[in-house]
Image (tube, rainbow, N blue to C red):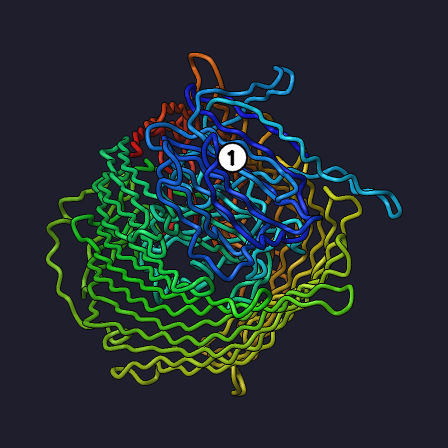
Amino acid sequence: MHLVSYVGLAGIVVNIVIQPARADVVKVTAVEIQPTALGAEIVLKTTDDESPQVFTSSFGKTFVANVVNSQLQISDRNNLRQINPVKGIAVVTVSEAGANSLRIVVIGETELPKVRVRQSEKGLVLSASTSATTVTQPPSSVEPVTKPPASETQPQVTTPQSEVPPTEGEAQQPITTEEEEIVITGERETGYRVPNSTTATKTDTPIRDVPGNVQVIPRQVIEDQGAVRINDALRNVSGVNFSLDAGGRSPEFNVRGFEANQFKNGLREDRQFNTRTSPETANIEQIEVLKGPASVLFGQAQPGGIINFTTKRPLPEPFYQIEFTAGSYDFYRPTLDFSGPLNSDGTLAYRLNAAYEHAESFRDFVSTERYFIAPVVSWRINPNTSLTFEGEYLRDRRPIDRGLVAVGDEVADIPLSRFLGDPSYEQEMDEFRSYLYLDHRFSENLSLRTALRYTSSKEFYNSVEANELEADDRTLLLGRYYGGQYYETYTLQNDLVWKFNTGAIAHTLLFGVELARQTGRYFEDAIAAESPSLDIFDPDYESVFDFPYSLEPDPTYSGGKLSSDTIAVYLQDQIAFTDNLKLVLGGRFDSFDSEERYPNDPTLNVNTEASEFSPRVGIVYQPIQPISLYASYSRAFVPQTGRLTGGGAVEPEIGEQYEVGVKGEFLDGRLASTLAFYDITKSNVLTDDPSNPDPDFSIQVGEQQSKGFELDVSGEILPGWNVIASYAYTDAEISVDNTYTVGNRLNNVPFNTASLWTKYTIQSGSLAGLGFGAGIFYVDSRAGDLDNTFTVPDFTRVDAAIYYQRENFKAALNFKNLFDVEYFEGVQSRTQAIPGAPFTVQGTVSWQF
């Protein structure tokens, strides 16, 4: 038995007993909630040789025990919630918190209940009371730790690692049934380490058992760093770099040198079709980054990796939080997060996240305004079936801002604040998403999840922006654009998971089918017959503001329509030969077709058809329990459009990767690390045909390569001291091409990146609840375009923060770019170099009730 004690804010009692980590899922065969002489007793009955693992937290009058690596295997679930079981305790609830985790919630009437957690012959026992009497442990066994924000849907906790298992023939020591209790004050903060992930396998799998590099940014890191935008959070992951945001719209990132496709809850967030603006973080629970080709489960994707956002889910007990953030450049942002049951038995629950944001900018004349609301309603129809509806609406207004321009072999030496265009013209973007999830368990080992999604996105743009820099290297020609775009997506995804054994070998089989349709149209697009110019070194904005534009239809886009359809089938088997040897085999077949139609200019019409098989194989070996060695091979594909010399269909780009790595868990599992080495080749890249001078025709002989290594570390070093750090070396270049010089670096891919963020919270005494955070982020120099005609310099940015939490109140001050370093977030071309913000201060206050 592994005992951990935590000390934090005075006046709150939490008792914790943590059992050694197990690789197997513990089956809870019965649940009893019954009164005792001192209070209430909650018993989770398990088989004799199984003991679940427990993490606890508390806030206000609510005690929460998260029982991980466990499943509820009972048919009658009508008595899992009791109102006023004994005097002093208002509610006791036992519920499923995930595929392999349970949550026990005990709410006191007037005070936080005192809860003793122990393992006995009955199973896992929680004894709850409101008695003021406590039993203390000797000081030598007490260790302080952090406290949790209650906003976590499922508090992310560190999984302690058990001792090295006995060798064959040794007797396994029985779990002691002696009742032991540690009394502590304070709430336990969720850590920076997340032990499990669903992105890599679409099943809830320990990251240590995944043959690949998976990194998770939990909500706690997002809040601690004051990350309002996802690029602020993703800088914590090795090998992930911000590329561009299409003039303040949908951001793009590269992973391992190639574009990273984005997903939400495992469903594709295509930049063209359903993500017209920067994603909102208000309802994001965590961000998972899967490195390397992921087409085996996600279809069309670049070989660098994917970014998957998981959203918040309803909580079993009432929770209300309001928050207000204000900062430099007239930034202010109120948010709310409400959740709880909608009926007496808790089978119907909701969650509501909303945000409003107004901000000026360090960029001249630029301002933004955003509205966001995201309701979620979950209905547990019966013990084996649940239905969840999730909606999102986001409205965003801002001018198109593409940053600065290059002069010669560097970005122009002008103030980073200089706006190169007319900011009086704005774009308006509206996005709507609706999701319906049906989860059904046919039996203990067979389950189905069906996801149905509809999205629509509308953009109206009216912009004056950089077009081309003239030969004098100071006169910037501008362009006036006017028009709109509208897109819809329909997605149906079915995942069937079957767990079974063939002799001593355990299998987790995933079978999936996905259907997707995307449609879009451009409407009333127009361009100016004439546009003004701007001296980038001495701009005369009045001449730009007063320019008499004459708009004419743009034949390239006017009335354009496009559509695409995808049908995919995939199969994956996670095979456990032994507890320390695991194999993952998978394959997916995609059939894809798309078309673009331009009635005003049929010569632009394009049809694309493709079908592709994407395999993956990976193996994990654990020589000792804290260490995992892995190796894998995987492929990715991306359909292309174009015209080939000699005719014929354009084949998809193919990405292939070989990867090896080692994962480690240290400090009783509180700290985790991943070291990965990879080699990626992307082939079938379109390039010029040297024997055909017509630029409209190409040949598919281009090739790009990326190889390097990465190190990621996250978790808790000491009680109250959390850290997340990364380093990546990426060598990405053009290996075969007729358009660009072989050996050129891929644009916006630095050789070296590194990050370190750490936070410490004082655990006891009069300053308990006071915390400090600091971070340093380094990005090497990058090529600005594939021609490598210019570079953006390297930079080192330092951030810091101060926190204070007392009961339900929390305040934070975040200092970003502490030393006011001039730098560029990303770069895409000679007219799109995105400057980073100077020194800014951001203050946040929140209240939970």
Residue at horizontal 44 percent and vertical 70 percent from the top? 450
Horizontal placement of 215 versus 308: left or right?
right
Query: SS at mark 1?
Result: strand
In the displayed structure, would residue 66 be above or below residue 585?
above
Other-residue count near label 1 (Cα within 10 Å), few / some / many at <14 / 14–19 / ≥20 = many
Of residues 649 and 332, the one drawn nearer to the viewer in this rendering: 332
Q: Residue at x 56, y 71 (%)?
A: 653
| Percent x, y of residue 135 | 55, 20
- Whether residue 786 appears in this view of the structure is no
Percent of width and height locating residue 203? 56, 60
Asked if residue 99 lies left or right of residue 632, the reply is left
List the residue tagged with mark 1: 127
Residue occupying the point 69% across, 45% down: 663
Q: For residue 721, which quarter of the picture?
A: top right
Side of 802 relative to 257 (left or right):
left
Q: Which residue is situated farthest in the right direction here?
A: 169
> For the point 44% across and 51% down, which residue is it?
80
Quarter containing the N terminus:
top right
- Residue 225 position, x and y percent, is 42, 34
Q: Quadrant of residue 86?
A: top left
Total numbered labels: 1
Nearer to us in this view, 576 or 713: 576
Residue farthest toward the top in the current orientation of the protein: 766
